[in-house]
Image: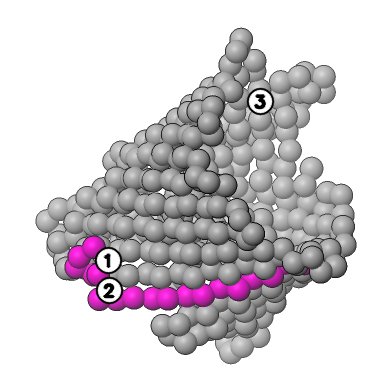
């Protein structure tokens, strides 16, 4: 309730302030999104929805430093028609809510923010704090509450340190949420490497299995979790990247305490017409009772191509292949952009169920085959 009142007051004040004052220190913009998804396979399903993200930002000079911030809300409602019934859902919540103190080489940002990193493009082992679906043309994702510090050295090396507030929401690849009111912490060191960069990342949290397991399962303790990762990206004749992450969870009800994710990819733009950008990635998931154990495993491949037909039109096509379950995922997106308006016509043909991405089921309906239409207005 406090968050709703705060956002309402901020937006109201922004609209009332004189235009000259706003231009000097405040900015207000927004994004309105409407979509509908049709899934003709039995049982017939259709989803429709509206989302509005108003954003208020400010910038204040403070000598050699800058103080800035962003406050935005996620206002949306959707409906799902399935069979002969309609279910409705709605939400009003903060989307971003942070303040930053920064200089040319340093920044300290606190609040509800987006934190992401890594070199992989689609299958991202380092998708730790966001849930971006590569098929989403807007790349929207919830943020995390935390404190992030970054320092940039003159040789392009940089170091990140963060502390996050644990809540009961699942983020990234997590299947078990963090213990509510706990503190998560970690860091990242990124160094120049040939024509690109190499980085090492670490994160610690306390998972709460009781939040997702049946009440009949009694657990004596929570689970400490540690993650480490390495990633690199270089630009040679083609762009090359790789990521690897290892997660250890001290779970008392399973012997498979280790999870490994591996990614390798490349991209190249062919000089055909306006230029066709082709991307390929391979992804592997391993789970076992020891590091890099493979008691359970999953392997995916991706091929993606993007072609800018003109200034207004572009086309993107993706194919994902599940080597383990022999499933093929297909997705195509035709984008049209005029000034403040963008339109997306998307088609998909997938297995009836898929579990690769932790997408938000409230705003996606990509199982089976069907179409999605989306209109976006930015002001």
Residue drawn at point x = 68 percent, y = 41 percent = 54
Residue drawn at point x = 21 percent, y = 53 percent = 223
Graded by Cα atoms within 10 Å as few (under 14), some (14 to 19) or many (20 or more), the crowding at tag 1 reads some
Query: Tag 2, which secondary structure?
Result: loop
Residue drawn at point x = 62 percent, y = 67 percent = 279
What residue would you read off at disc 3? 58
What residue would you read off at disc 1? 292
Residue 293 magenta-drawn? yes
Tags 1 and 2 touching, CB below 8 Å: yes
Say which label, 2 or 3, has the lower sequence index.
Answer: 3
Numbered label tally: 3
- State the separation of the CA atoms marked 2 and 3: 50 Å
What residue would you read off at disc 2? 294
Say which label, 1 or 3, has the lower sequence index.
Answer: 3
Q: Main secondary structure of the magenta part?
A: strand
Is 257 or 223 nearer to us in this picture?
257
């Amino acid at each position: 309730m406090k968050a709703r009142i705060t956002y309402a007051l901020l937006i109201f004040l922004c609209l009332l302030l004189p235009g000259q004052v706003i231009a000097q220190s405040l900015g207000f913009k927004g994004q309105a999104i409407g979509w509908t998804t049709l899934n003709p396979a039995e049982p017939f399903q259709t989803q429709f929805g509206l989302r509005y993200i108003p954003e208020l930002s400010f910038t204040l000079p403070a000598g050699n430093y800058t103080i800035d911030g962003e406050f935005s809300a996620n206002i949306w409602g959707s409906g799902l028609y399935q069979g002969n019934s309609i279910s409705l859902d709605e939400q009003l919540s903060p989307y971003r809510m942070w303040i930053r103190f920064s200089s040319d080489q340093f920044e300290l940002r606190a609040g509800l923010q987006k934190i992401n990193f890594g070199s992989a493009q689609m299958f991202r082992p380092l998708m730790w704090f966001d849930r971006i679906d590569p098929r989403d043309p807007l790349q929207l994702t919830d943020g995390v509450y935390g404190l992030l510090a970054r320092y940039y050295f003159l040789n392009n090396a940089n170091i990140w340190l963060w502390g996050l507030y644990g809540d009961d929401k699942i983020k990234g690849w997590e299947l078990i949420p963090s213990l509510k009111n706990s503190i998560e912490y970690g860091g990242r060191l990124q160094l120049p490497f040939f024509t690109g960069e190499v980085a090492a990342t670490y994160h610690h949290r306390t998972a709460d299995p009781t939040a997702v397991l049946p009440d009949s399962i009694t657990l004596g303790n929570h689970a400490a979790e540690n993650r480490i990762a390495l990633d690199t990206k270089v630009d040679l004749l083609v762009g090359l990247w790789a990521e690897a992450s290892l997660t250890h969870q001290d779970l008392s009800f399973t012997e498979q305490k280790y999870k490994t994710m591996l990614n390798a990819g490349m991209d190249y733009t062919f000089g055909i017409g306006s230029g066709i950008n082709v991307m390929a990635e391979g992804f592997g998931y391993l789970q076992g009772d020891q590091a890099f154990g493979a008691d359970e495993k999953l392997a995916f491949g991706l091929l993606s191509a993007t072609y800018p037909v003109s200034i207004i039109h572009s086309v993107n096509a993706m194919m994902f292949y599940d080597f383990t379950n022999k499933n093929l995922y297909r997705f195509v997106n035709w984008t049209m952009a005029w000034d403040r308006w963008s339109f997306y016509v998307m088609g998909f043909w997938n297995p009836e169920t898929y579990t690769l991405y932790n997408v938000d089921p409230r705003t996606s309906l990509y199982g089976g085959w069907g179409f999605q239409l989306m209109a976006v207005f930015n002001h």
